[in-house]
Image: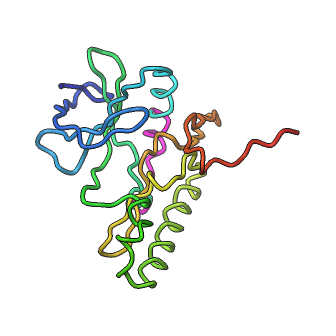
């Protein structure tokens, strides 16, 4: 499928679906293995998603932040309608749930997990350093390189984003086991 970017001067041709979640699908992009596209399949609140992603693109995080997360690189439009966004590709990584699996971790030394925890802490701190909040921090959104414990935060469109006008773009999704209970006052 063909899409254009935010400024309408970049074209993207999406191909194979490589992953899917509650809100959308991740597709490869023809001619560039470094990036992938998230195409929303849940077409509710598209205007709010579009506003949040525009705000994220204006933030322009430093390189050390983008090492630790799949920050949006461009937006996608099909027939003039907002449909998703482009982000870096992180193929060959496992999500944290796979790392937890006893069969996968039984022969891995303890220092690997300490290193993984340190990398995850650095990733979270890098987002907080931007003044942003990770709204849906769950094991499916934490990718791990099993060779070195390197971690990448994905699903960044579920972050709470504060834009340059101090408007807050909230996270509206969450993994029930990982969301703090709501406190009534």
Name the image quarter holding residue 101: bottom left
- Percent across and percent down for residue 175 are 55, 45
Task: Answer whether residue 62 is visible to the viewer in this image.
Answer: no
Above or below residue 156? Residue 92 is below
- Percent across and percent down for residue 94 are 33, 60
Above or below residue 9? Residue 88 is below
Name the image quarter holding residue 16: top left
Task: Answer whether residue 82 is visible to the viewer in this image.
Answer: yes
Q: Main secondary structure of the magenta part?
A: helix
- Percent across and percent down for residue 24 are 37, 33
Above or below residue 163? Residue 130 is below
Nearer to the camera, 179 or 153:
179
Q: In this view, does 32 lie to the left or right of 160?
A: left
Q: In this view, does 66 lie to the left or right of 167?
A: left
Rendered-image quadrant of the N terminus: top left
- Would you say residue 63 sits in the magenta stretch? yes
In this picture, which residue range is highlighted in magenta? 54-64
Above or below residue 185? Residue 4 is above
The extreme left residue here reads: 31
Rendered-image quadrant of the C terminus: top right
Q: Which residue is drawn at 56% across and 41% down?
A: 174
Q: Which residue is drawn at 60% across and 40% down?
A: 162
């Amino acid at each position: 499928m063909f899409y254009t970017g935010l400024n309408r001067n970049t074209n993207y041709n999406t191909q194979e679906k490589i992953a899917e979640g509650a809100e959308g699908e991740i597709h490869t992009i023809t001619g560039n293995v470094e990036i992938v596209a998230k195409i929303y399949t849940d077409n509710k609140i598209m205007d709010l998603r579009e506003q949040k992603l525009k705000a994220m693109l204006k933030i322009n995080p430093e390189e050390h932040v983008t090492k630790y997360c799949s920050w949006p690189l461009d937006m996608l439009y099909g027939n003039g309608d907002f449909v998703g966004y482009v982000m870096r590709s992180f193929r060959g990584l496992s999500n944290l749930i796979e790392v937890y699996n006893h069969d996968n971790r039984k022969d891995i030394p303890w220092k690997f997990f300490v290193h993984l925890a340190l990398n995850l802490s650095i990733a979270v701190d890098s987002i907080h350093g931007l003044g942003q909040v990770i709204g849906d921090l769950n094991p499916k959104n934490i990718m791990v390189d099993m060779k070195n414990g390197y971690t990448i935060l994905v699903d960044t469109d579920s972050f709470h984003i504060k834009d340059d006008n101090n408007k807050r773009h909230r996270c509206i999704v969450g993994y029930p086991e990982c969301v703090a209970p709501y406190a009534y006052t």
